[in-house]
Image (spheres, rainbow, N blue to C red):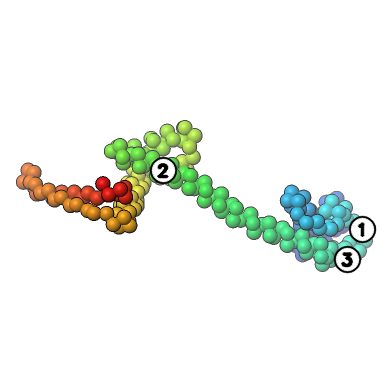
Amino acid sequence: MATLQVGEWKDRNPWLDIKAGKLGCLVCRKAKTLLLSEKGPGLHLSEEWINGDVTSPDAKQLRKKIYKHRDSQAHARSVEIVQMKDKETLPNCFIDVQSDLLKKTTVSFRTAYTVAKERLSYKKLNPLMTMQELNGAEVGNIHKSDHACAEITSHISKEMRRKFVSNVKEMDSKVSITIDESTVHGRPYLIIYVRCDVSGKGM
């Protein structure tokens, strides 16, 4: 087969596998692999095309074989099987990426929460994340700076406040308010204490 002729056949039929003057079908080969791995319903595929054993001494006859295989029901079904499998793979890849990102974000948020709870400097997030990584946790390359720690802490506090207020409203808890006003070094201060039951026990 002439190199130019082979190139034209490949351009028109990307599924063609041409080796040592013999033709094969990449799509049918992949479809058979998928069917065997999933033990799905049987499909009659040409072993000659799968194994790459299609040949002919005449280029015209070889071209006819290509067209005949391209238009066959078995090849069309193989194309459908491969396309369906590719569509299934994309969501799975997206889910894997999302899951990996969620794990890394969880480590960052828990570490930042510890920094805030223990009243540490926001700059402590970076060395603590390094320690997490040394202990085997997947931390990624983000959420390590003091600015990230401040943003995470702010987000967590807003969510905790939102959940707290929502729980109080749902339980219809009684609320007591105490106001304490004082002056320190010439500056007035006003402190508001709020007490309410969040346990649902009425205590």
Identify the mark nearer the N-term, 2 or 3: 3
Image position of 67 with respect to 55: above or below = below
CA gap, disc 3 to disc 1? Answer: 10 Å
| Image quadrant assignment for residue 81 | bottom right
Q: Residue drawn 56% across and 53% down? A: 94
Tag 1: residue type?
Ser
Quadrant of the frame with the N terminus:
bottom right
Q: Does any portion of residue 154 appear in the rendered image?
A: no
Q: Could you say whether the residue bearing mark 3 is in a helix, strand or loop?
A: helix
- Place of residue 22 in the rendered image (x, y in percent of width and height, measured from the top left): 86, 54
Q: For numbered disc 2, what is the local secondary structure?
A: helix
Mark toward the viewer: 2 or 3: 2
Residue 194 sits above or below residue 72 on the image: above
Sequence-wise first label, 3 or 1 = 1
Identify the secondary structure beneath mark 1: loop
Q: In this view, does 177 lie to the left or right of 148?
A: left
Image spot of residue 119 (x, y percent)? 28, 38
Amino acid type for the residue under numbered disc 3: Lys
In the rendered image, which residue does mark 2 sit on? 108
Q: In this view, does 134 lie to the left or right of 35?
A: left
Separation (CA) of disc 2 from disc 3: 62 Å
- Left or right of 172? Residue 85 is right
Which residue is the site of mark 3?
Answer: 64
x, y percent for residue 2? 85, 58
Crowding at dot 2, Cα within 10 Å, few <14 / some 14-19 / many 20+, comes out as many
Q: Can you identify the residue that label 1 sits on?
A: 56
CB within 8 Å, label 2 to label 1: no
Q: Which residue is drawn at 52% across and 46% down?
A: 100
Which residue is at 77% across, 60% downward? 78
The foreground one among 44 and 10 is: 44
Residue 183 visible, this orientation: yes
